[in-house]
Amino acid sequence: MATEQQPLISLSELAVGYDGEVALRRLELEVRRGDLIGVVGPSGCGKTSLLRALMGEIETYAGESSRRGLEGGGALRIGYVPQVDTVDWNFPITVEQVALLGAWRERRWAPWAGRRARRHAREVLEQLGIEELAERPIRALSGGQQQRAFLARALISDPQLLLLDEPTSGVDIKTSHEILHELRELNAGGVTIVLTTHDLNGVASHLPRLVCLGQGTIQADGSAEEVLQPEVLERAYGQPMLVVKRGLETYVLPVPEEAPGAHGAEEALEAADLTLIERGGDA
């Protein structure tokens, strides 16, 4: 849970982008120690760009950003897990070698991994339940194993802040739940986490804090109940959205553009496969 202490990262009126083109503007965001944040929004809205803004690895055109380590000083240690579809899975490297790519603090200036770094890598792989895959080439991994291999690369450097880009993309529902459970355990152990997700029903609705992007800026920041509201989602996604509550669960459905209003809501409910939705399907 978040605390009232000074934020790890603070963005104020920040505008960022690429090659002089603004991708996100007027960013106002604080990431505090202990946060578990999901970033949602339509495809191409800038979710990855926001992660890069948090890392300070994107062009800045206006505003301010600050990052600070935890007690004891030093720079904020950030671990980053990319989208799996950005990785060359034919590259000849094993799971253990992937993890060791993140062991820069233990390797110092040596071009190879020493005994200590290798032992640490095995401990992290064991923590994630993939130690038996240490010698397996990454091209032979399943989607969930791929995510855990790159999560190991991020965790081996003992990050204070962990950023993950679509960590449940391309995996089945069971694996998605397992990955989310592992992230919750890491968060309970003191790691601050920010992740992006396209899954409004299966992932976002179960996170304690959401940031919704749309139209080039942050549309809402708060609890899942506060953010998953029709007016917020319509601003972000550019179309009417229906929010259905069933007990403790919240489901988001797009309303057909050709049938707005109450009639469109009825059509959305009739067209939706609620069985799939209840299992965590995408809106």
Image: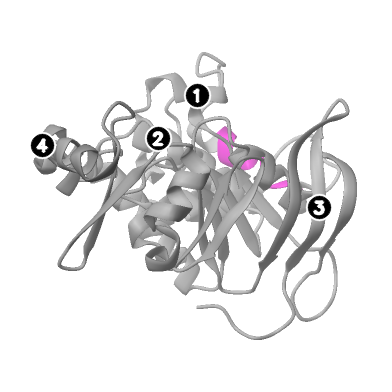
Dot 4 or dot 3: first in sequence order is 3
Tag 1 residue: 85
Q: Which amino acid is tagged 2? A: Ser
Mark 3 or mark 2, which is nearer to you? Answer: 3
Marks 1 & 3, CB-CB < 8 Å contact: no
Between 256 and 113, the residue placed more toward the observer is 256
Q: Position of residue 27 (x, y in %)?
A: 73, 54
Q: How is the image coloured?
A: one colour
Tag 3 residue: 14
Tag 2 residue: 169
Name the dominant secondary structure of the magenta segment.
helix
Q: Position of residue 204 (x, y in %)?
A: 39, 54
Task: Say the numbered circle drawn on residue 270.
Answer: 4
In the rendered image, the vertical position of residue 99 relative to residue 229, given as above or below: above
Dot 1 or dot 3: first in sequence order is 3
Q: Is residue 155 visible?
A: yes
Residue range (magenta): 97-104
Dot 3 or dot 2: first in sequence order is 3
